């Protein structure tokens, strides 16, 4: 038994080595890192796209505004991440550069899928190159292409999928259950934000706090990335409480 254990030990030491049952163990570890990250939600609405994320500010001495979970890539594209945020920052910087290069070279805005593929190409390279490790982060990329809202999820191995609504991070299972039950394509941005806050509130429970929430949206008509102010989040949260109150007879 001991020789077999010794033989199996090496398969998670190098990213380029497949285990006997056809798995890349380092990639699977990277996916577990994402599942331990704070929750992020993306949603396609009838009039745009919404991104909402938990910043997980657990130290009262930290300035909440200094923690960033949602980034602007271009006027019409935003992103949210879960996992190792330093890994996310490198990928977001690359995406922002790609978007600006497209404007300078072609005098036009880059489409969302081009950004997603560029991020995934780099992630994939890190799954088959010796001396590297996979990016321990999943990124939700949301944008407006020709007045059509689109949402993509990229995972550590470099695979991407297009979604109507999805979640990543520690609350993924609980949030997706809510989305499966309550998401509708007809939801407006305002309704999508409320549904996302409702889902986060259920996942975080007593730890839910407006200071922890980072949120942004891109309207189909304007195609401009806009952050949600803390006061607006507070108002929506209070409206959720009002909705829960039983109707007076």
Image (tube, rainbow, N blue to C red):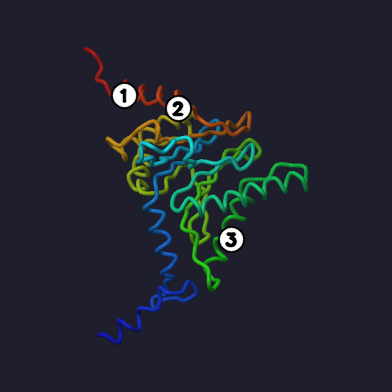
Instruction: Work out which residue is located at the far top of the displayed protein and give it.
Output: 249
Element type at marker 2? helix
- In front: 187, or 54? 54
Q: Residue, x 37% and y 35% (percent of image)? A: 182
- Furthest toward the bottom, the residue is 3
Residue identified by numbered label 1 = 241
Question: 76 or 61, which lies in front?
Answer: 61
> Residue 112, how many percent across, how many down?
61, 46
Q: Name the quarter where the C terminus is drawn.
A: top left
Q: Is residue 156 left or right of residue 112?
A: left
Q: Residues within 10 Å of mark 2 (few under 14, many from 20)?
A: some
Question: Which residue matches tag 3?
Answer: 122
User: How far from the left and from the top, in percent, is residue 195?
Assistant: 40, 32
Earlier-in-chain disc, 1 versus 3:
3
Residue 4 higher or lower than 240, as above or below: below
Number of numbered callouts drawn: 3
Dot 3 crowding, Cα within 10 Å, few <14, some 14–19, many 20+: some
Q: Which quarter of the figure is the N terminus placed in?
A: bottom left
The answer to which quarter of the image holds residue 126 is: bottom right
Q: Earlier in the sequence, mark 2 or mark 3?
A: 3
Question: Counting other residues with Cα less than 10 Å from the Cα at mark 1, is it few (<14), some (14-19), or many (20 or more)?
Answer: few
206 to the left or right of 88: left
């Amino acid at each position: 038994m001991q020789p077999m254990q010794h033989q199996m030990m090496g398969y998670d030491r190098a990213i380029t080595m497949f285990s006997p049952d056809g798995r890349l163990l380092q990639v699977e570890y990277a996916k577990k890192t994402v599942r331990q990250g704070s929750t992020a939600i993306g949603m396609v609405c009838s009039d745009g796209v919404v991104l909402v994320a938990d910043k997980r500010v657990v130290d009262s001495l930290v300035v909440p505004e200094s923690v960033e979970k949602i980034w602007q890539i271009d006027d019409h594209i935003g992103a949210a991440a879960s996992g190792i945020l330093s890994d996310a920052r490198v990928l977001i910087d690359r995406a922002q550069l790609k978007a600006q290069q497209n404007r300078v070279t072609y005098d036009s805005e880059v489409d969302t899928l081009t950004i997603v593929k560029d991020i995934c190409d780099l992630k994939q390279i890190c799954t088959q190159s010796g001396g590297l490790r996979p990016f321990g982060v999943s990124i939700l990329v949301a944008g407006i292409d020709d007045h059509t809202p689109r949402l993509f999820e990229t995972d550590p191995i470099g695979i991407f999928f297009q979604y109507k609504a999805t979640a990543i991070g520690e609350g993924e299972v609980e949030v997706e259950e809510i989305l499966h039950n309550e998401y509708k394509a007809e939801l407006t941005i305002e309704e999508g934000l409320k549904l996302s806050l409702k889902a986060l509130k259920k996942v975080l429970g007593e730890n839910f706090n407006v200071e922890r929430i980072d949120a942004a949206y891109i309207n189909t008509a304007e195609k401009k990335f806009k952050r949600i102010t803390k006061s607006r989040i507070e108002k929506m949260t209070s409206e959720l409480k009002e909705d829960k109150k039983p109707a007076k007879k």
